Image (cartoon, grey):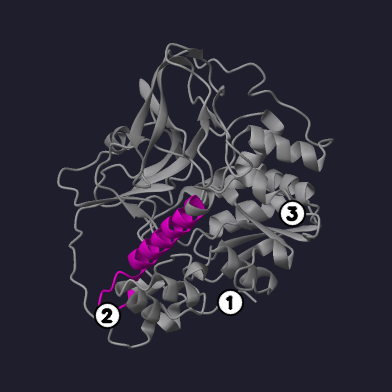
Amino acid sequence: MFRFRGGIHPPASKELTQGKRIEDAPVPEVLAVPMVQHLGGPAKPRVSKGDEVKKGQLVGEASGFVSANVHAPVSGKVAGIEERPLYQGIEAPCVVIEKDGREEWADGANVERDTSSLSPKEIVEAVFDAGVVGMGGAAFPTHVKLTVPDDARIDTVILNGAECEPYQTCDHRLMVESPGTIIEGLLLAMRAVGAESGAVGIEANKPDAVKAMSDAASSFGNVTVLSLPVRYPQGSEKQLIKALVGREVPPGKLPLHVGVVVQNVGTANAICEAAAWKRPLIERVVTVTGDGVSRPGNYLTRMGESATELLEHAGIRAGVRKLIAGGPMMGIAQRTAEFPMAKGVTSLLALMDAKPSDWQACIRCGRCVEVCPMGLMPCDLSILIESRDYDGAEESNLQDCFECGCCTYVCPARRPVVQMVKLAKAELAKAKKRKQSAKTG
């Protein structure tokens, strides 16, 4: 128990923000709300230029089951719908809203209701209506996870409070400051999927969070809060399941196949707000950190705010060499800060010293194999991808890699294994799309 294979111990680097209480970020005059803030189909704009909108109003409608609704983060006027660059490296439509300063909620939003009588179906509907997605960074639509197939049985819901990614403390502060809301969200998720028990896994370097969550869960006999050894990537779904309940998710399978659903603690917080308050997901806690800012902290940020404005509020320094949306292990390096904040952005990491390094041929040392939590052969994958044998990489279980970065971190040849994996997955997806188009065309 509490162990998984592989993993590494990178410097935590959390001291800059772990003691900083959540602070409201200033709301800018103009927000560009992306229609792509989730995995799956983009939301379809449901407003037009010149429309008046209220806070929490639906401005983007989910385009299918694996999609998510998008709501106005402020009341104001729609200035237009424009293509904007996003942190994922793509461009997508954004609803540009000029705020009016009234902060007036849409009808039916931000209304308290009793959750004790909500059925599983009603909980899932509330989550879907609110546009809740995974808040740990993946941004997978939460209503999909809570919709259990007829042939599956879920007995445990796990909350991921590990926050093993270096520098990030947004989940840490949320657990310390809003533990009751998180536990209520866990109980609602358990009811939605029919689970009898719940567990919260938190790394041991957050003792104040362990205590706060334990106190909040103490009156519920079917919820356990556990302190886990500090080890990256402790917060990955399959590793967390192995550590907490001792079950291994087979290759190509999902957690539901072993009777488990995993949610981030921030997601649980959003589930509670969606069900108990009818509050759409229009803001999230973002850690802004690194030696490139003078006022690092944890900021409650509206979706659609420019990363530039948030960084300016945190006191960005002149001469920043690298900006990462997310953490240093799994985040995405940015060419510019001119992108809107979205549901999947957990942190902004600004670094003053980031020197590029040349990489070399694989020396077959095997270090990447030792640390891979999925038991893969990253060295072989990188060689196959380098030779553009993407099919061969797929046959070597490429899709089981969740891009944690352990292999790249330990590689003495400085090989960009994770970037190679991302490239191969993208090329395989393109090839699959071409084949489908050829069949239908």
Which is in the foreground here, disc 2 or disc 1?
2
Residue 12: in sight, yes or no? Answer: no
Which is in the foreground here, disc 3 or disc 2?
2
Residue at screen point 54% across, 71% down:
229
- Indicate yes or no whether the magenta region holds residue 407: no
User: Where does residue 284 sit, x and y in percent of width and height?
Assistant: 49, 38
- Secondary element under disc 1, as helix, strand or loop, is loop
Task: Report, in whole angstroms, how far the alpha carbon at label 2 lies from the one at label 1.
Answer: 26 Å
Mark 1, residue position: 3
- Secondary element under disc 2, as helix, strand or loop, is loop
Graded by Cα atoms within 10 Å as few (under 14), some (14 to 19) or many (20 or more), the crowding at tag 3 reads few
Residue at screen point 52% across, 30% down:
44
Residue in the foreground of this view, choosing between 34 and 162: 34
The residue lying furthest to the right in this view is: 117
As drawn, is 180 to the left or to the right of 387? right
Q: In this view, does 294 lie above or below 9?
A: above
Of the two numbered discs 3 and 1 on the same chain, state the one appearing first in sequence. Answer: 1
Q: Give the range drawn in magenta.
A: 409-437
Helix, strand or loop for the magenta stretch, by majority: helix
Residue at screen point 20% across, 59% down:
354
Q: Which amino acid does label 3 sit on?
A: Ser
Residue in the foreground of this view, choosing between 116 and 379: 379
The circle drawn on residue 412 is 2
- Secondary element under disc 3, as helix, strand or loop, is loop
Mark 3, residue position: 218
Of the two numbered discs 3 and 2 on the same chain, state the one appearing first in sequence. Answer: 3
As drawn, is 219 to the left or to the right of 208? right
User: Where does residue 62 sit, x and y in percent of width and height?
Assistant: 58, 34
Residue at screen point 26% across, 45% down:
293
Task: Report, in whole angstroms, how far the alpha carbon at label 3 lies from the one at label 1.
Answer: 25 Å
